[in-house]
Image (tube, helix red, strand yellow):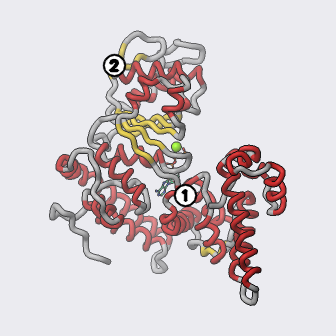
């Protein structure tokens, strides 16, 4: 094992220590000398040790956070040293992997926001890791030992919204058979994570605004105000400012929530992380499914590295888990979910075609390359207009029937590109 990493303060870096524990846990899982019960027991001890290290780190972390400069432009630094710097400052990553500069920037903003009690708004497409980022803000702040309460604002039926958020008194409505705490009270002393805040109906927005202003709630059916001390972290995949312009989101609430903004980049903007994430999920899935990590054929790897991931990291994770469950030792294209398989096969044919040009004349090679470029243009174009052929014709200045002929020639169907169904980058 490598020696402990020492942080800038001269004390052993807690981040480095946690990393060592993770490496130890990973190597234990595949130990051939211990039986499963012994492995489980040592893994359990590792977990206890990890928790102790994290608890110990909190006091020093606040001292370090105070020494940080106020929010401002972050100096250019190579990605590896930026991640190492976070580790040296005992940053808790909550399992966020990757060295992509955009992701590191988000983590650095989260780090600076964490020790304050300011509201944070996390933006990002579905499946990019918004909830994970909310946990990062919570775990690196002074409320880390308090509760982290997650509320999916889009999943609560309208009539139950108030009672879910603020609780109710016994008898307040039919079915309220006992007093009940709401999410805000449960988050007292900790963080409340308001996921999908853009889905909160207008009447809920008014109520939420009132709570943010007064820091008091009232249970449904009660006049007594209850003081709550919960840090607000909200997340959305919607354009809230656009919703404000359309009158669907209250402007005053928007500015209350969006004091610090953290953007989580989509996976297609951090493709450099794909090899690391694929590897990580293969090992994670193997551990959960109690099997050896999956091997991937070269063509499957090539496809996974070129795919567009409209569902972001969640989609990648699901694909790897599915294959880890269905394939034996090695996975290939046939183990992909059906909606990806056709795309993967055509990708594979394209790359094979691109390689098999030996013996061709220059004009044949040119023709093949131009066909491939033409198809790429159409795929990309359809993806950008959500499969609307008329719109693509307008944007690209093409005649609609000519465009239809080209789509037919390449076997492309506009309906495959509707509703984010398009796939490969
Ligand atoms: N950088 C990362 N490293 C490792 N795993 C990640 C990373 N980002 C996200 N994940 C994993 O991807 C999955 C989706 O993350 P999460 O639930 O936080 O996304 P989300 O943006 O809240 O998604 P949704 O909008 O669909 O609710 C989770 O299983 C999470 O653990
Ligand atoms: Mg989420």
Q: Label 2's element?
A: helix
- Front residue of 364/424: it is 364
Which mark is on residue 329? none
Whether label 1 lies within 8 Å of ligand 1 gets the answer: no
- Front residue of 407/334: it is 407
State which quarter of the image contains the N terminus.
Answer: bottom left
Q: Is residue 356 shown to the viewer in this render? A: yes
On the rendered structure, is 102 left or right of 359? left
On the rendered structure, is 299 left or right of 408? left
- Front residue of 40/205: it is 205
Q: Which residue is mark 2?
A: 214
Q: Name the residue located 36 percent from the left edge and 62 percent from the top edge.
A: 45
Question: Residue 380 is drawn in which quadrant?
Answer: bottom right
On the rendered structure, is 305 left or right of 226? right
Residue at the far top in the pictured view? 223
Q: Is residue 200 above or below residue 21?
A: above
Q: Name the residue located 42 percent from the left edge and 55 percent from the top edge.
A: 103
Q: Is residue 169 above or below residue 48?
A: above
Q: Which residue is mark 1?
A: 268
On the rendered structure, is 7 left or right of 202? left
Return the x and y of residue 277 as percentages of the image width and height. 51, 64
Q: Is residue 418 shown to the viewer in this render? A: no
Q: Is residue 45 above or below residue 382?
A: below
Label 2 close to label 1 by CB (< 8 Å): no
Q: Name the residue located 47 percent from the left edge and 39 percent from the top edge.
A: 235
Residue at the far left in the pictured view? 10
Marks 2 and 1, Cα distance to the nearest angstrom? 41 Å
Return the x and y of residue 202 as percentages of the image width and height. 53, 21
Of circles 2 and 1, which is in front? 1
Return the x and y of residue 385 as percentages of the image width and height. 68, 47
């Amino acid at each position: 094992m490598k020696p402990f990493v020492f942080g800038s303060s001269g004390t052993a870096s807690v981040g480095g220590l946690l990393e060592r524990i993770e490496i130890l846990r990973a190597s234990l899982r595949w130990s051939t000398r211990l039986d499963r019960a012994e492995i489980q027991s040592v893994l359990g001890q590792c977990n206890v040790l990890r928790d102790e290290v994290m608890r110990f780190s909190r006091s020093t972390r606040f001292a370090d956070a105070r020494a940080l400069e106020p929010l401002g432009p972050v100096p250019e630094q190579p990605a590896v040293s930026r991640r190492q710097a976070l580790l040296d400052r005992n940053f808790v990553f909550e399992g966020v992997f990757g060295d992509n500069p955009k992701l590191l920037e988000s983590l650095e903003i989260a780090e600076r926001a964490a020790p304050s009690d300011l509201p944070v708004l996390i933006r990002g497409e579905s499946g990019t890791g918004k909830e994970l980022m909310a946990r990062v803000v919570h775990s690196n702040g002074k409320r880390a030992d308090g509760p982290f309460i997650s509320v999916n604002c889009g999943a609560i039926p309208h009539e139950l919204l108030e009672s879910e958020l603020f609780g109710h008194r016994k008898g307040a409505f039919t079915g309220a058979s006992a007093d009940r705490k709401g999410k805000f009270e449960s988050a007292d002393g900790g963080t409340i994570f308001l996921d999908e805040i853009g889905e909160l109906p207008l009447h809920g927005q008014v109520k939420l605004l009132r709570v943010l202003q007064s820091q008091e709630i009232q249970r449904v059916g009660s006049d007594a105000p209850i003081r709550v001390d919960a840090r607000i972290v909200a997340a959305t995949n919607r354009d809230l400012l656009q919703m404000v312009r359309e009158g669907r989101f209250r402007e005053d609430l928007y500015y209350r929530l969006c004091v610090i903004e953290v953007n989580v980049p989509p996976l297609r903007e951090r493709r450099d992380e794909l090899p690391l994430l694929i590897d990580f999920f293969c090992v994670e899935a193997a551990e959960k499914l109690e099997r050896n990590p999956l091997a991937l054929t070269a063509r499957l790897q090539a496809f996974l590295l070129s795919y567009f991931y409209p569902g972001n990291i969640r989609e990648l994770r699901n694909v790897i888990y599915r294959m880890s469950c269905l394939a034996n030792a090695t996975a290939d294209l046939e183990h992909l979910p059906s909606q990806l398989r056709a795309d993967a096969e055509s990708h594979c044919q394209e790359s094979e075609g691109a390689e098999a040009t030996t013996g061709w004349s220059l004009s044949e090679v040119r023709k093949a390359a131009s066909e491939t470029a033409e198809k790429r243009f159409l795929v990309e174009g359809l993806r950008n207009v959500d499969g609307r052929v008329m719109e693509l014709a307008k944007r690209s200045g093409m005649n609609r029937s000519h465009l239809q002929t080209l789509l037919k020639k390449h076997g492309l169907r506009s309906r495959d590109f509707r509703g984010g169904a398009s796939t490969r980058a």
